Amino acid sequence: MIKFGPSGNSESFYAAGYSHTEEAAAFVKERGLDCFEYSFGRGVRMSEEKALSIGEAFREAGVEISVHAPYFVNFANPDDEMAAKSYGYVLDSGKMAKLMGGKRIVFHPAAQGKVSREEAVQKTEDRLKILRDYIYLNDLQDMMFCPETMGKIAQIGTVEEVTRFCRIDPVYTPCVDFGHINAREQGSLKTADDYLSRLSYMISELGYERMKHFHVHFSKIMYSSKGEVKHLTFEDTVYGPEFAPLALALKELKLEPYIVSESAGTQVEDAAAMKHIYFEV
């Protein structure tokens, strides 16, 4: 089943007087949504008790939960000691996701830094092979670790690079952020064919079964010549991308991803809008 939900809590969640993540489960469910992404963006600072409490609330509501690893993951870091911290960030996120009853961990692969693009990509690939070994050693191989397509030119994470990383092992599933792709490619996603070409490429490289339930981030994003500037809401009419062409492409390819809205403050409303569009087109 295709799923729709927000990344974190929207402005409307707080405006309604809520404050705890446990309350987000029913809030999301009442709005007809199916999933929720919890962000450890600034670090994995959560007790096991809290993770279990969140997991229970989401299980009772019948809403699936995923997590986003800390934003400072960088598997191309030239400093081995700093890179080693990235293993910890992703593995700690995985352990918390498991306690919450989730199966998906999204992470940013790397930044290019001062080396050549290929050198940074190769270093990232080598370290993701080491991460794979740690995933198995920690008995987390039943989880889906999702390297994300990135929005800034200086970040590692094109469609081709993320696909390359996912070829390493079945523990890796792509997180395709279409807003990021559109931003780094200067407004490239306009028609259903634009989405179809990228998704068909990933299916050809990874196989249909690996892609059927892939992870999606979607939002409209302002961009400059360097790529992503900031996330917008569905009210934007300048930057895009639009969701309807993606909905058509997903139906044509019979894909049923987990779709997370990363709109700026209107995540719940825009997730609901995407679900409505999907079932209308």
Image (cartoon, helix red, strand yellow):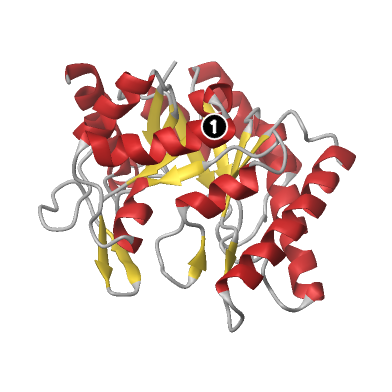
The residue lying at 67 percent from left, 55 percent from top is 44
Q: Quadrant of residue 105?
A: top right
What residue did someone put label 1 on? 65
The quarter of the image holding the C terminus is: top left
User: Viewed as shown, does residue 61 lie left or right of 46?
Assistant: left
Q: Nearer the viewer, residue 76 or 276?
A: 76
User: Viewed as shown, does residue 39 lie left or right of 52?
Assistant: left
Q: Does residue 244 appear anywhere in the picture? A: yes
The residue lying at 75 percent from left, 41 percent from top is 95
As drawn, 224 above or below 36:
below
Q: Position of residue 240 (x, y in %)?
A: 20, 51
The residue lying at 49 percent from left, 40 percent from top is 37
As drawn, 178 above or below 273:
below
As drawn, 106 above or below 192:
below
Q: Amino acid at mark 1?
A: Ile
Q: Position of residue 179 (x, y in %)?
A: 32, 51
As drawn, 164 above or below 155:
above
Secondary structure beneath dot 1 equals strand
